Amino acid sequence: MDDAIQPGQLLARGVSRHLRHHAFVSVEEFVPDRGLRVDVMALGPKGELWVVECKSSRADFQTDRKWQGYLEWCDRYFWAVDTEFPTELLPHDTGLIIADAYDAEIIRMGPETKLAAARRKVLTQKFARQAACRLQGFKDPGVAGLISMTGEEDVE
């Protein structure tokens, strides 16, 4: 198994670090619904939910066929790319973050589309469960086999 950190993961780390300066907490590789996995889901101090998709290259962006499906799972949507990425490829009606492994900067805010209260509640609970399960797995590696990355129990 290759444990090397991938370029997109480095961008996600920088984005997560930057969002902490805005009082957001984040979960990387968050699963909002079956079949979906966003690079970064961020939860703000007022309960706002942002999705950030990290693209490390033109090819990475051009082969992404699922990103529009993520729009219904957040209040704001952003792309995170490095300084070499051709940003003119990115849709102008989405947010833009320039990032590296250590930090990031929000260049353009994504338009706000408020989630319905019921969906916000479900996503916030999933966010809490996924974060807690990952922390528990980190603190007690023996429990990692009992809980999946999505926070759902693997035991009956």
Image: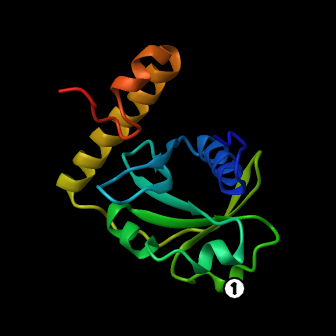
Residue at image location 45% in from the left, 64% down from the top: 76
Q: Residue at x 54, y 66 (%)?
A: 78
* Other-residue count near label 1 (Cα within 10 Å), few / some / many at <14 / 14–19 / ≥20: few
Q: Position of residue 12 (x, y in %)?
A: 63, 51
Model colouring: rainbow
Please name the residue shown 82% across and 71% down the image: 84
Along the line of sight, which residue is nearer the eye, 104 or 64? 64
85 with respect to 145 (left or right):
right
**Residue 17 percent location from the top left of the image:** 66, 42
Q: Is residue 135 above or below residue 127?
A: above
Q: In this view, does 94 lie above or below 125?
A: below
User: Is residue 134 depicted above or below 47 in this figure?
Assistant: above
Quadrant showing the C terminus? top left
Closest to the observer, 113 or 6: 6
Q: How many marks?
A: 1
Q: Quadrant of residue 1?
A: top right
Instruction: Report the residue at 66% width, 45% height from top.
Output: 13
Residue in front for this viewpoint, 50 or 35 = 35
Could you tell me which secondary element the residue under label 1 belongs to?
helix
**Quadrant position of residue 55:** bottom right
- According to the picture, the residue beneath numbered tag 1 turns out to be 88
Residue lying at the far front in this picture: please name it: 1
Image spot of residue 138 (x, y percent): 52, 21
Q: The residue under label 1 is which amino acid type?
A: Glu
* Left or right: residue 96 compared with residue 148: right
Give the image location of residue 4, x and y in percent. 73, 43
